Image (tube, rainbow, N blue to C red):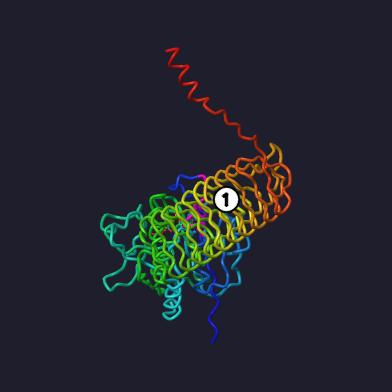
Amino acid sequence: MSKPSLTAVVMAAGKSTRMKSRLPKPLHPLCGKPLLSYVLDACLQAGCSRLIVVVGHEAERVQEMFHGQCEFVLQEQQLGTGHAVMVTQPALQNYQGDLLVLPGDTPLIDGHTLQTLVEHHQRTNAVATLLSAVLPHDAGMYGRVLRDSFGNVLGIVEAKDASPEQLAVREINTSIYCFKAPALFDALQRLRPDNAQGEYYLTDVIGLFTQEGRKVEAVVADDWQVTLGVNTRVELADVASRLRWRIMERLMLSGVTIVDPASTYIDADVQVGQDTTIYPNTYLLGSTVIGEECQIGPMARIENSQLGDRVTVLASQVVESTLDDDVRVGPFANLRPGTVVGKRSKIGDFVEVKNAVIEEDVSMAHLTYVGDANVGAGTNIGAGTITCNYDGNRKHRTVIGKGCFIGSHATLIAPVEIGDGAYVAAASPVNQNVPPDSLAIARCRQEVKEGWAKRRREQSSSEG
Ligand code: UD1
Ligand code: MG
């Protein structure tokens, strides 16, 4: 038998007043992705075939970011969570199935927890099933789940409306529910905003159902952490640290050594191969993919980059770059977007590379800037070499062939080409192409004045 269809309604229209931010809460970054994306991923993992996101505050920005990933319903005025679901009714007019309703601000929720909720709901044939959690600490501003002496759910009371006895309840409402859709929309019409915040509370639907004697169930989350909501930046930081731990736990269990998880920051989508070691104070960001047996850090920052196997990156930054197997980077290198480095090449200290293809077995070990350039296989770039790529108006390319030797402190004034196997003498400014296998030398001949220094010393001591 195929599974009944499941639709999710994600409430993400609120003003997020407590974030005190110009950026709408669903778009706040969390381990490299916007907050809301985690909730949508969990819904997909739980088998939802339709995702409806309620947008309102800064709706256009949210819609732009999630374009093509879900449907949107506009809640023009944010009159509360009950109202947020109410406005989805036209989009769900003929829908008779179950509705998973959840807030856009619980990013640690996972597909497994949602599935458990839905399965319980369907097995018990309840009209509504809520996901609750028992926190190990004070429940703060969460809504409290009220039960009778037999343990049956009676309703939910918001912290702002609760009595001191109700506030002492440790079981909280996670704001994640499964409803029979027709019954939900029927109950929503009966909501009244007679509470401390003057809002239509979705939570009141639970009380309405129990008063009518309809079956309401609650599933207590196995792990309370997955239900944490983000309402302030303090909660955002707390959730981020838990999420980071989860990400690193997964990597460590798959064979990655992370020397100090407390000082390591790895985004959700980063992939790291087996037997790679990540040293402290390291950031692996965005869509970065790292191969096997690499040594990363200490103090590396790698963003949206691809690294092969056995790559070393020590105390360096690598952004939107591709490093092939056995490449060594750092310490103190800066690889900017568009850098491609071939097998076994070495990019050493105080080297900056941008928009450049460096082939295999190249060495640029110290104090160099290579921008808008190609460097052929086996070439050696001496310390202090600079590609002058910018003429004040435009950028130009420097093309260095295979097996070249560029002496220290060469100044390569683009556009310029150095042929395969050519030499450039140290300290030469080069602005004309150098044919293959030749030597370019462009500097004044050295003059030596023998005895000059001695004579100068004797002259100044006789004057003194
Ligand atoms: C809500 C619950 C509370 C629960 C907590 C769990 C209510 C009344 N309270 O409180 O019981 O313990 O979540 O995290 O439901 N939203 C809209 N439109 C609105 C108002 C809110 O879309 O008009 C969205 C928000 O953007 C947010 C979600 O609904 O994503 C929840 O709203 P929020 O203000 O964060 O509610 P809480 O105070 O956290
Ligand atoms: Mg909230």
- Please state, as top left, top right, bottom left or bottom right, where the N terminus lies in the image: bottom right
- Farthest bottom residue in view: 1
Residue 146 lies left or right of residue 42; in this view the side is left
Q: Position of residue 311 (x, y in %)?
A: 50, 62
Name the amino acid type tagged 1.
Arg
Q: On screen, 4 above or below 12?
A: below
**Position of 103 relative to 445 (above/below):** below
Quadrant position of the C terminus in the picture: top left
**Left or right, 310 with reference to 414:** left
Closer-to-camera residue (459/274): 459
Image quarter for ligand 2 equals bottom left
Which of the two residues, 389 or 428, is positioned nearer the viewer here?
A: 428
Q: Nearer the viewer, residue 224 or 356?
A: 356
Residue 145, percent from left and from top:
34, 64
Q: From the viewer's perspective, is residue 382 above or below residue 153?
A: above
Q: Residue at x 44, y 14 (%)?
A: 462
User: Where residue 453 appears, x then y in whole percent?
Assistant: 50, 25
Range covered by the magenta-colored residues: 22-36
Within 10 angstroms of label 1, few (less than 14), some, or many (20 or more) residues? some
Asked whether, in this view, residue 457 is left or right of residue 322, the answer is left
Q: Residue at x 43, y 69 (%)?
A: 275
Residue at the image point whose x is 68% and y is 45% from the top? 440
Magenta stretch containing residue 35, yes or no?
yes
Residue indicated by mark 1? 336
What kind of element bears circle 1?
A: loop
- State yes or no: residue 337 in magenta: no
Residue extending furthest toward the top: 463
Does 77 sit above or below residue 227? above
Q: Is residue 66 left or right of residue 455?
A: right
x, y percent for residue 330 = 48, 52
The residue positioned 64% from the left and 35% from the top of the image is 445
